Amino acid sequence: MNDLRVAIVGATGLVGQEFIRILTQRNFPTKSITLLASDRSAGKKLLVKGQEIEVKETTPESFNDIDIALFSAGADISRHFSPIAAEKGVVVIDNSAAFRYEPDVPLVVPEVNIEDAKNNKGIIANPNCSTIQMVTALYPLHKVNPIKRIIVSTYQAVSGTGTAAMDVLTSQSQTVLAGQPVTPHVYPHQIAFNLIPEIDVFFDTGYTKEEWKMLVETRKIMHAPHIAVSATCVRVPVFVGHSEAVNIEFERPMAPDEARDILAKAPGVKVLDDPTVSLYPHPWMAAGTDDTFVGRIRSDSSLPGGLVMWIVADNIRKGAALNAVQIAEEMVKRGWLRG
Amino acid sequence: MNDLRVAIVGATGLVGQEFIRILTQRNFPTKSITLLASDRSAGKKLLVKGQEIEVKETTPESFNDIDIALFSAGADISRHFSPIAAEKGVVVIDNSAAFRYEPDVPLVVPEVNIEDAKNNKGIIANPNCSTIQMVTALYPLHKVNPIKRIIVSTYQAVSGTGTAAMDVLTSQSQTVLAGQPVTPHVYPHQIAFNLIPEIDVFFDTGYTKEEWKMLVETRKIMHAPHIAVSATCVRVPVFVGHSEAVNIEFERPMAPDEARDILAKAPGVKVLDDPTVSLYPHPWMAAGTDDTFVGRIRSDSSLPGGLVMWIVADNIRKGAALNAVQIAEEMVKRGWLRG
């Protein structure tokens, strides 16, 4: 296996820094790591595998002599630089929504559809955080018993918005605890000790783009164009870890024990489900880990044969950086990505 | 209208103190207010309509010369003292779950089924907080177009647990912000910057009692024994205000505009629904208010003719103390409750 020349675009951001940590922790075969960001961040130095590396401004020339570029710098940067990089033969794994819905761009969760990554035209899209953890948990069930309908309510951490939102949660929480009034910032309303049922922009349907993503991305990743999905996406005052309450309707009845057995063997999934000892996943325990955790598995009291479950994962790791690196790892393993 | 001799049982608790505030704010016709609690709280003095009143220990004799008793001191106290009070001719409105599921005990949300209160045998039950706000918002729709199935995920504030839980959210938040580890207290896991998908005890079905309540209480209050309900109830790090993401299936299709029109005229309901200006309810704005707020009304993308909405209310007011006082007010107005 040849070592790869890796570029990280958006290296100073929350997901960018997680890319660095994960490449190091997983011993990803790198020949070199190039850190790229906006001119604002250029010159900063970040520690990579014990070595200081200077962040460079992203330019078209940045992608000369690069094998793989991990992008997480927003959709505008991706839209501009990904095609330039791909043109130079770089394989781009893009964490933004810029290319996810293009029919010829693979949208990949390795545990579900790594085969799609093979037929890339230089750009592979990393799905939305909320979608990744949901399909990781649901696809193993869907393979056994096709899913017809999914109703999901999310409880999403502020880290999904970025560093500024984490700072806002900290400072607003301090302000509230000091008995002072909060001026909203980053979000349209106070997030400390509050909830905001608005993530990404609103569409005319009344759904937000985040909610719409959970429909279209699930269909694309699972190759299930007829699956019905309704999502309500809510920002909660949690730093790291997205949670989801999910009701699932299958073609045939599915018992909780059958689902538990399937999920116990599923890649990337860990079942934590013992109510007698208050064992179920929650974001505080999932933060910093790699698995998609599933608990509270039970028969749907409103639908014979249906299931309800509770899915939690680290939105910055499995929901973003880890999933992208796993795509690269699997491609290297299959010889689809070479130095 | 004769003035009433009112007793508040559990007067020093969170709901008890809200009883006092609400009786005062709404100018409830009282001849006297007696404050009762455990022997631990006896002797404390609370301000009622500008006057200090001493809290007395609850004994059978406490209910002599009382017309109406508002109970919020837990199920054990209710189970013990409510029948004693009722025996003495007192009308008990009980905020605990002690009698809610007895066939001959009315379970009442005034906007829905005040008529049920008439045939009481001395005890009227106040429903669970999560149920009250849901049926207040859904019953007006159900009357026009019967509801077949409800899927609800809740986001419940810690005040539902009581004063100790509010203190725990404060102290744990301070601990986390100071970078120190938290030792769980009151809840089985840390609640600060976290979520706990466990409210009340677990049943063998995998549902919690809180989730089960949303099924059986909704059926009883709405006189809809066949309605299907599945709930996932989650504690969130919010002080006051429960929120609910609800998917609703009707007998016939229901359009969002029709629902908005119906809810705009519904008693106790306020529609806040304009995505273009980020207008939707959230707990911080609902805390301290009396209405049940509804927003994010949209057609269910997973079910033609279905609806999705977001319901928020102050769980201590409409979810507890206010609803109980409203029951009393409506009974007084109808001559079912006299001094």
Image: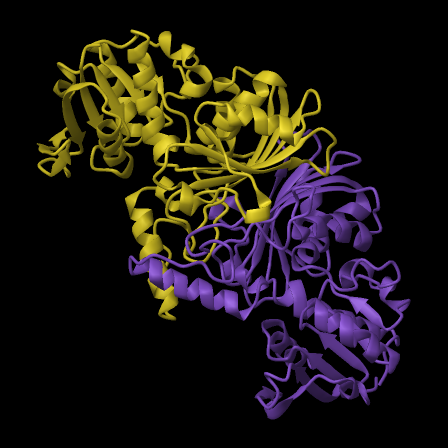
Chain colours: A yellow, B purple
Q: Is residue B215 visible?
A: yes
- Vertical comparison of A21 with B169: above or below: above
Residue A211 on image: x %, y %: 51, 34
Left or right for A173, reference A21: right
- Residue drawn 14% across the image and 37% down it: A46
Asked whether B330 or A254 is in front, the reply is A254
Most foreground residue, A142 or A14 = A142
- Which residue is nearer to you in this view: B337 or A21? A21
Quadrant of the image occupied by residue A332: top left
Q: Which quadrant is the N terminus of chain B positioned in?
A: bottom right
Outermost residue toward the front in this view: A277
Q: How many marks?
A: 0
Viewer can see residue A181 = no
Residue A234's spot in the image, x, y percent? 49, 44
What is the x, y in percent for residue A34? 14, 25
Q: Position of residue A197 (x, y in %)?
A: 50, 46
Left or right of B220, for residue A199: left
Q: Up-down: is A94 above or below A310?
A: above
Q: Residue at x 23, y 24 (%)?
A: A27
Q: Is residue B105 above or below residue A151?
A: below
Q: Is residue A42 above or below residue B199?
A: above
Residue B53 sits in which quadrant?
A: bottom right
For the point 77% across and 74% down, the residue is B80
Q: Is residue A79 left or right of residue B172?
A: left
